[in-house]
Every structure is written in C-alpha cells, then in structure tokens.
Amino acid sequence: MSLLAVSNLAKRYHRGSKPFPAVDDVSFEIGPAETLALAGPSGSGKSTIARLVLRLIEPDAGRIEFEGADLLALSGAALRARRARLQMVFQDPLAAFNPRATVARVLDDPLRIHGIASRAERPRRIAALLERVGLDTGLAGRAIHEISGGQRQRVAIARAIATRSSLIVLDEAVSALDVSVRGQILELLLDLQRQERIAYLFISHDLGVIRAVAHRVVILDAGRIAESGDARAVIANPQSAIGKALVAATPKLSRNRP
Amino acid sequence: MTALLSIRDLSVRYRRDGVEVAALKGVSLEITAGERLAIIGESGSGKSTLALAVAGLLVGSAKIDGTVEWKIPKSQTPHSFAPPSVLPDISPTRGEISSLAAGSPPATLEVAESGDGRAISPLEGEMSGRTEGGATERRSSAIGKTQQQPLLGRDIGFVFQDPSSSLDPVMPIGKQIAEVTRTHLGLTWREAYAKAQTLLDRVRLPNPEAALHAYPHQLSGGQKQRVAIAAAIAAAPRLLIADEATSALDTIVQAEIVALIRRLVAEDGMTLLFISHDIALAATLAERIAVLRRGELVEIGETRQIIDAPRHAYTRALLDAHLGLDAAPLLARQGASA
C-alpha cells in the first residue's frame, strides 16, 4: 500500500493576466521507507508539488491521499494531527527558523504542540533527538544563528522526526551544504530511513545526489511528468528530451586513478 | 608562459564583532596570461576573499599583508601594487560594472584601514550570496587612479553569483552595459549603445536590439547572468573573474553559462579566474586548479593531475565526496553493509 498517493494534481499561477500551469496532471505514489526524487529545471514545478503535498497551497484539481486519508478533505484538528506525520526540511534552515530561537526551543515546539511529551519529559526527549541526528546535547542552549549550516540542517531533521513522521519532504535540503557535510547529512537521512522506515519526497536539481540516495525518480518539465522510473536506470538511460538534457548538463568528473 | 598576476604571501584578516578572523593565510600563486585557473574550496576556504583581493574589492577594514603584482605586458611597464583595500564609487544604483578601482600607493606592503565599524566582510556575503549591498557600504579613502593601476571594469571583469543584486533593477540593461564602455573606453552614448547591442548578441541574448531596453526583472536568472557577463567583458578586460557565477542557476542553465564563459574567454584571449565550490564543474572548464582550505593553499596543479593524482589528502576527500553520475550510490553501499 502506498503511503502517499498523488493523482491528477494541477495548480495554475497567473503571470500577469495569463494563467500558466505550474503543475499539470501530475500523479505518483511513495511507499513506506521509500525515497522518490523529483528532478527538473527551475520552473518545472518541483517546489510547487512540495507545497501542494504539504498543503501550504491548495491545488486547482487532483487528489492527495496520505496514510489512507484524503489529505485535501482534512481541516482543523484532524489536519494538524495528520501533519505531525508529514514533515519538511527546506534548503535554508536559517530562513525556516527564528534565528534567535535556541536549538532547544525549535525542538520543544513540535513536542509541545503535538502533545508528544510532557513538560517534564521534554528536555530528555530533546537530548535524545539531538543525539539521534549526531549533535552534541550541549548544543541545546545555542541560538540557531550561532551554529553552522550543517548543524542547522541536522536540527531541521531532528525537528522533522520529532513528531514520528512517516514522510519528510526534502526541498533542496542538501543543496547549500559543502560536499563533505552533504555526504554526512545524506548518510544520516538513509540511516533514519532504515531505522524508522521514513519515506522521503526528495526534491533536487542534482542528478548525482538523486542517483546516490533515491529509489525512484520523477523528471518534470513545465509542470508535467516527462518520465519516471528506477532512479539509476532513468539517469543511466534517459528517454525524455529534458531527462537527456539534465544528464548532459551534469558536470562529469572522470577520474583515472593510478 | 608569462604571468599576468603574481600573488605573494597574501594574508587577509577581517575583524568581526571584535574578533579577528584570518580569511587568507600566506597564499602565493601565479596566474598565467591567457590561462583558465579555477580556485576551489568549501565555505570559509578563502576562495572569494582571494577573488576580491585580486579585484581590489576587499572591504576597507580588511587587513592585508603580501602583494598582488600585476604584470601589464607590451608597452606598459610592469609594476607592483598592494591590493587596494577599498573600492570607491560603488553606489547602489551602479553595481560592480561601472566601478573604479582604487589603487593604493605602490610598494605598500600593508594596507590596514582604520576600521569604521560599518564594513561588511565578504565572509558574510559568502553566506548570504554575495551582494552589492555589501559593496554599497564601502567608502573610498585613498583614490589613486593612475593609468597603470589595474582598473576593475577596464582591466578586470567581475561576475558575481547573484545577477539580481549586481544589476540595477531600475535601469535598462542596455544602459548598464553602455555605461561601462562610456566610462572605460570613452565612447559616446551612441557608440556605447551600439557596442552594448553587439555584446548582448555575443552573450546570445535573444533579440538584442529590443533587449537593450529591457529591465532586469523581465529576464530569467540565466539571462540576467548573461547580461552581467556582457557588462563584465564590455571594456575588454584582460582578466575575467567569475565568483560562483553559476551556483544559483539550475544544471542546464549552469552548463550554458559555463559554455558561454569558455567561448568568450577563448574569443577575447582573456585570462579566467573561476571560483567554485564544485570540483567537477571546475574541472570541465579550467586548465589548472588551486585548492584552498581554511585560508591556505592546499595544492595547485594541472587539472588532470589534481583529479587523477591529487597530492593532498584534502583534495582526495573533496573528490571522494563528489556524487557524480558514476559514483557508487550511497543506497547500495548501505544495502551492502546492512
């Protein structure tokens, strides 16, 4: 059974008076503990799909089923409860969090709001979350703006798993990181997936990263699905024009090791 | 193999919240005339500071030691200058394209401006996507505009990461390019506009004649970067510096802009200093690669040597961290170990 089933999703924006389709008849499914990547050039609809799935914006047409529930029909307390299971990590956690909040505050909020842990229990839970994402528990008292970009992204992941989520939308979540840090964050995501059976909707412009971590890939072009399939098979032998263009444009590092 | 620039023992320190941060520590390297040299490194490596030092764009409060010696060939005599520490005449409405570099007096080894407390360090710019907003805070001090000094805009073209902040949002792009040739080549407005149209054609902007009157917001990110490149090369500089010039663009547009830079550098015989965090991208464009880490030059060599036989463990780590289309997937590695 699929964890997330998106069918015939559509969203139009208006550019001046002209409507233009940002997402046009898009359907896909994600199973438990699976990583589905969305790839495509800027303007292909990747981030709009992320926002639709998170219900940060409303679609013009289509259906989103999450854990068997019609996500678009939910509202109020039922939607909030379901949202605990559906989390997100964006490219720039400094923009996503109040920069002056402490790490502990950022992790305390979801635990409190979703009633996951009592006030007395929360400091221990926060420490456990920090350890789970490979951070020193001493970081809890630090402000978000004081810690490094890699540490901030670990805090964002800790927050996303704090509510026992089953699906995390990762929108260019590793794109701004240095390559050495990026590798560690990807390893952490894979480890969490294996241990907690978390699924990822992994949005990236980088086919190399997608190939490294995703099971399947959907390649988008101008709001429509150009092709989809096993990530390594599609990237090794793209069939669509946009898939071929993306592969051709990816810098190749051909190493001849002595 | 003549050197265009010789950088000797260059150190740059910034003061930030009362704490001194060393951005570059005793870096020495030569840039050969006509070569394509990539400077790669992660955040905090000093790669952008090096680019700014060569262009004379460092903030006034930066403490600079060492020399950047600029060798102007042919009729002009070689001379030396300490990296100018400030850049005058960057107003919010102009951006880098029309700026004039300040030359510090030659043979000055240390240029330490008295900090005025307002300076914005390039380190901050590195995190926010370097903007001309930083540059607007800079103020001129000693302006030594002798003709032998390398002049930003005339002798050095600079392309920044974010074209939205290096272009003036309320000035037609044709005028922004025409200003460069008016300032540096002394053209009339009519000549400057004709030249701007030719430049827009050279950077392959569709319909260059109409594009002269377009405003930056009417263009895509890739098109804006083409305009910024047109402005940077307008006065036929000897050295083109591209500082993460393709990092904010998607993969396909990035490849187009890299191809454009490669073609323009070849056509005009420019020297290229290509600053990037992406070793694979740098390798597609550069003949030599310099690797920086925490302000130090780790190694420099021919691109093939750096990629195939890196001498330093850090370079090897960078290469191993690259996730290419032929790398072993992390998923598979994990599956194997699980």
Image (cartoon, coloured by chain):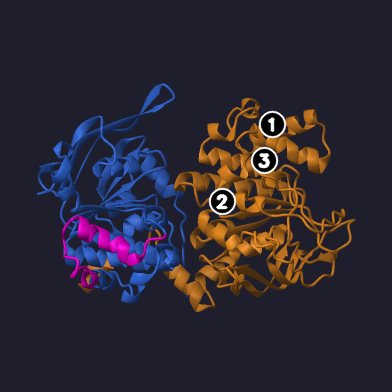
On residue B161, the disc is 2
> Of label 1 and label 2, which has the lower sequence position?
2
SS for tag 2? loop
Q: Nearer the viewer, residue A174 or B78?
A: A174
In the image, is residue A88 above or below residue B301? above
| Tags 3 and 1 on a common chain | yes
- Regarding residue A257, the answer to whether it shows in the image is no
Write down the region rendered in magenta: A100-125
> Of label 3 and label 2, which has the lower sequence position?
3
Question: At x 44% / y 52%, what residue is drawn?
Answer: A250
Amino acid type, residue under disc 2 in the picture? Gln
SS for tag 3? loop
The image quadrant that residue B49 belongs to is: bottom right
Mark 3 vs mark 1: in front: 3
Question: At x 25% / y 41%, what residue is drawn?
Answer: A55
Instruction: Check whether the beta carbons of the residues at disc 3 and disc 1 lie within 8 A of each other.
Output: no
Mark 1 vs mark 2: in front: 2
Q: Which image quarter holds the N terminus of chain B? A: bottom right
Indicate the chain coloured blue by its letter: A
Residue at numbered disc 3? B93
Residue at numbered disc 1? B197
Q: Nearer the viewer, residue B230 or A18?
A: A18
